[in-house]
Image: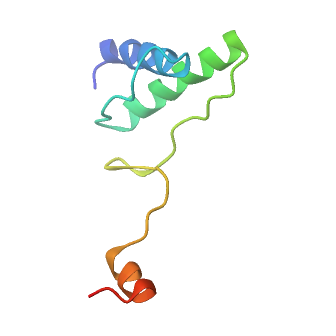
Amino acid sequence: MGIDNIDDMAFKGFDFASEKGEMPLFTDDMDLMAFNAGISNANIRYGLKVPSVNYYKTKHIETRIRASDKELQTVWGLN
C-alpha cells in the first residue's frame, strides 16, 4: 500500500460506516487501519456506533463464527 491509498481506504471506511459503501478487500495491515480510521471518523461525526473491523492475521478478517465440517459430523452424525 502506498501513501496515496491511505486516504482512499479511509474514505471507504467512512462510506461503509455511513452505509454508502461496501467492505473492500484488504491487502495489508495499513489498509485495515486506514479503513478503521474512516469508520471512527464517521462514528464521531454522525454519532454512530459502527464497530471497527477486527482481524487475526492479514488473510483472515473476523466474521461470525461458523462450525467446522468435523464439528457438524460429530454433532449431527453426518458422514
Figure coloring: rainbow
- Residue at 52% over, 28% down: 36
The answer to whether 28 appears left or right of 35 in the picture is left
Disc count in the image? 0
- Residue at 69% over, 21% down: 48
Residue 56 vs 78, above or below: the answer is above
The image quarter containing residue 9 is top left
Question: Which quadrant of the rendered structure holds the N terminus?
Answer: top left
The answer to which of 50 and 54 lies nearer the viewer is: 50
The answer to which of 25 and 31 lies nearer the viewer is: 25
Residue 27 vs 21, above or below: the answer is below
Question: Which quadrant of the rendered structure holds the C terminus?
Answer: bottom left
The image quarter containing residue 31 is top left
The image quarter containing residue 32 is top left
The answer to which of 41 and 30 lies nearer the viewer is: 41
Residue 47 vs 72, above or below: the answer is above
Q: Residue furthest right?
A: 47
The image shows residue 52 at horizontal and vertical percentages of 57, 35
Residue 54 vs 69, above or below: the answer is above
The answer to which of 72 and 46 lies nearer the viewer is: 72
- Residue at 45% over, 17% down: 10
The image shows residue 44 at horizontal and vertical percentages of 70, 16
- Residue at 35% over, 84% down: 73
